[in-house]
Image (tube, rainbow, N blue to C red):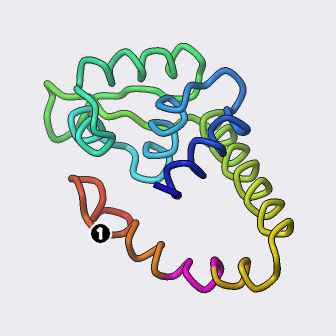
Amino acid sequence: MALARVSRQLDRHSRGGSLSTTQASVLASTAKHGPVRISDLAEFEGINPTMLSRIVAKLEDAGLLRRRPDPDDGRAALVETTEAGLAQHRTLREERTRLLTDRLAAMPADRAAQLLAALPALEALAQIPSGPLSSENS
């Protein structure tokens, strides 16, 4: 619950311009795992492919993502991040890092040290496979 609250607070303060939380997440996943099929990205994000297609279309219109044919399956398309999308993703990540750093600096030193000591365990938790993309490019 605490992680979810921190995540929501970060989302409120680092929206990446006009991107929704879901759009920012799709952009981040594509930057990390792309090029990727929409069906795999939808499963990884936990949203249905139709909804993801709409999100990808908005990100395409914004110049942050692009689709291209899947060379292994002519019926499918791959989604990848554009240079502008990578720049936006880096900006969002830097904003979130700055916000977390500021929050840690405002905490008592012993509490901040406890959180920093827990980071390897949290990183390991984030690496546990939960979908088709989670084991790729980790």
Percent from the top left, x then y, of residue 122? Answer: 47, 73
Percent from the top left, x then y, of residue 25? Answer: 48, 39
In this view, 107 is above or below 93 = below
Helix, strand, or loop for circle 1? loop
Q: Residue at x 45, y 36 (%)?
A: 26
Q: Decide if residue 85 is on the left or right side of residue 48.
A: right
Magenta-colored stretch includes residue 119: yes
**Residue highlighted by disc 1:** 128
Magenta-colored stretch includes residue 43: no
Q: Decide if residue 101 is on the left or right side of residue 75.
A: right
Q: In terms of depth relative to the viewer, which is nearer, 24 or 40?
A: 24
Q: How many marks?
A: 1
Percent from the top left, x then y, of residue 89? Answer: 63, 43
Q: Residue at x 61, y 86 (%)?
A: 117
Q: Amino acid at mark 1?
A: Ile
- Extent of the magenta region: 115-120
Q: Residue at x 33, y 24 (%)?
A: 52
Q: In terms of depth relative to the viewer, which is nearer, 102 or 40?
A: 102
- Which quarter of the rendering shows the N terminus? bottom left
- Which quarter of the rendering shows the C terminus? bottom left
Percent from the top left, x then y, of residue 3? Answer: 51, 57
**Snapshot quadrant of residue 36:** top left
Q: Decide if residue 118 is on the left or right side of residue 107.
A: left
Q: In terms of depth relative to the viewer, which is nearer, 30 or 24?
A: 24
Q: Residue at x 24, y 57 (%)?
A: 130
In this view, 6 is above or below 85 = below
Q: Decide if residue 20 is on the left or right side of residue 129.
A: right
The secondary structure making up most of the magenta span is helix
**Snapshot quadrant of residue 86:** top right
